[in-house]
Amino acid sequence: MNLLERFVNRTDFTNYDDLKKNYRVTVPENFNFGRDIVDEYAALCPEKTALVWCDDRGEEKIISFKDVSENSNRIANALYDAGIRKGDSVLVMLMSRFEYWYTVVALHKLGAIAIPATAQLTYKDIIYRCNYASVKAIISVTAKGVSGYIKSALPQCPTVKLVLTIGEKTDFSKDFGLFYENARADGLNFKIDNRADDAMLSYFTSGTTGMPKMVTHNYAYPLAHALTAFGWHRCKDDGLHFTAADTGWAKASWGKIYGEWIAGCAVFAYDYYGRYTPLDLLPLLQKYKVTSLCAPPTMYRFLIKEDLSKFDLSAIEHYCTAGEALNPEVYKRIMDKLNRPVFEGYGQTETVLCLGTFPDMEPRPGSMGKPSPLYEVVLLDDEGKVIDDEREGEICIKYREGQIGLLIGYYTADGNIRSVWKDGYYHTGDVAHRDADGYYWFVGRDDDIIKSSGYRIGPFEVESALMEHPAVMECAITAADDDVRGQVIKATIVLAKNYFPSEELKKELQDHVKHTTAPYKYPRIVEFVTKLPKTISDKIRRVEIRQNDSKQ
C-alpha cells in the first residue's frame, strides 16, 4: 500500500495536459513527515521496506518502516533529553549511512531544523555553516578526515553544544549509536506542535555571487515531492528507487526519502568510503533489482563506456536525469544500449521539480521538459516582461496562493528571512528558451554557477581559497567544457610579484584549494595571465574568459 491517495487527488493521469490541469495536493495544517508518513506506514504495514542499504565493505541491511519509526523515536527522545528543541539547527554529515534516514526523520519529529551537508566540508566550511545557522548540534561520520575538521572548528563555533559521531572514537564527541540505543522507541517523551509552514529543513547553496546562502524549506516540502516521485521518477508501490546523490545535497531530498516513501517505494542507498566510480554500481543495480534510476549526466557518460550487456538491468523500468542538459549523443547511446529513454527534469535547491519530461511526453534530448503542475513557469526578459517562444529569458515562477515546494526564503545570520520574490515572481537566475511545443531548453546561469560531475559549484568560494595563497594576486573561476564531467573548474590567475608560472606552482595551487575548501572544488585547469578582463567599474568579466576559451 502507499499513502499517496491521502494527499494527492489522483495518480491515473492519462497525459500531460490532464496532469497540468487537474493535479492537486492536500496539505494538512500540521503535516509532519515523520508522524504522518513514517509512523503511519509503521502502524499500517510495519514490515514494508523503506530502505535497502549496503556499503563498500559488504555490509547490507533491509530496513522497514517500523525500523525507521522506532529508531527515529529513539534519536528524537535522546536529542530532546540532551536539550535540542524545536527550531534548533542540527548539522547532519552522515554520507549515506543508514542512520541518516533515522536522524532526519527524528529531527522532523522533534521540530529541529535539519541541515544536511557533505562530509567533504573543511573546517572553514564547518565554521561558516555553524555560525551562520547558529548550529546547536553536529551529527557526523568520522571518515574522510571530517572528524579533524570538526575538532579544529569547534573552538570557533560557540553555539554548538553537542557533537555525535559514527566511526572512530574521538575526544570531542559522543558515540552516536550509544547515545540513542537505550532511548524510548515506542513513542515520544514530548509533544511537538508544528505547522506545515514552519521551518523544517535547510541546505546551504553552492555560493555564486557570494558565500553560500541558507535555503530553508517548510514541513509541506515533502508533499511537493510526491509528484517528483510518481510523476517523474515513476516510483511504484513496493518498488526500489535509486537516486545517485550525496545526502548533503538537495537532490537527496528529491530522490532518497520524501516523495519515494509517500509513494510507497523503497529507497536504495550505497555507502562508500573509498574511491567511487559508477561502474561500482552496476552489480548492485543488478543484485538488488532497482526499478527506477535517477543519475546526473556525468554518470550516464561513464556508464555508456562500459559493456552493459554483462549486467542484467531489466528490472529498471525508468531512467531520468537532472543537474545539467543531457548531451544528445549520450542519450542516443543509452537508448542503443538499454533500449529505454532518459527523462530529463529541472529544479533547484530552492524548489522541487519545476520542469520535467513526464511519462506520456516524448523525450527531447537536451530539453528539461515542460512545467510541473505545481508551478506557473514563465520566461521573463531583463525588464520583467513575459516573453514569447524561441526567445531567451530567465526561468521564473509566478506566485500562487497555497504554493508548496518553494523555499521559505534565505535565512540570514541574524535569523531573519530574506525574500526571493520580486514583482510576484521567484527568480531562478537560470536562462532558457521555450520551443513552439512548450518544451524548455537550458541556456546558462546568470551568476556563473559551475556544474561538474553532478556538483553545483560557485566561483566565489574557490576564488576565496586561491586568494589565500601568497602567489595569487587576482583570479577568476569559470567553467570549461569537459566530455566526461560536463564542466570542470578553470582558474585564470594573475600572479603576485616574484612568482612565476610553472607546473610545480600549478600543482601547489590545486592542492591548496583541495585543502582549503572541499576537494571537488579544485581547478583542473589553471591558466596564468598578466591581467584579467574587467568592466569599467573594475568587475571581472568571466563571460569574456569563457568566450575566449570557446574560440580556442
Image (cartoon, rainbow, N blue to C red):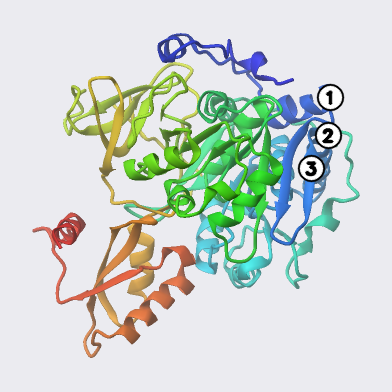
**CA separation in Å, label 2 and label 1:** 8 Å
Which quadrant would the N terminus be assigned to in this image?
top right
Front residue of this view, candidates 143 and 157: 143
Identity, as a three-letter code, of the amino acid under mark 1: Ala
- Residue to which mark 2 is pinned: 66
State which tag comes first along the sequence, 3 or 1: 1
**CA separation in Å, label 2 and label 3:** 11 Å
Q: Tell me the number on the disc at residue 62.
A: 3
**Label 1 neighbour load within 10 Å: few <14, some 14-19, many 20+:** few
Q: Tell me the number on the disc at residue 43.
A: 1
x then y, percent, for residue 208: 34, 52
Reply above or below: 275 against 486: below
x then y, percent, for residue 240: 67, 35
Identity, as a three-letter code, of the amino acid under mark 2: Lys
109 relative position to 186: left or right: left
x then y, percent, for residue 346: 40, 35
Q: Quadrant of residue 152?
A: bottom right
Q: Quadrant of residue 266?
A: top right
Q: Residue at x 40, y 43 (%)?
A: 333
Reply above or below: 119 against 340: below
Total marks in image: 3
State which tag comes first along the sequence, 2 or 1: 1
336 relative position to 50: left or right: left
Question: At numbered mark 1, what does the secondary structure look like: helix, strand or loop?
Answer: helix
**CA separation in Å, label 3 and label 1:** 18 Å
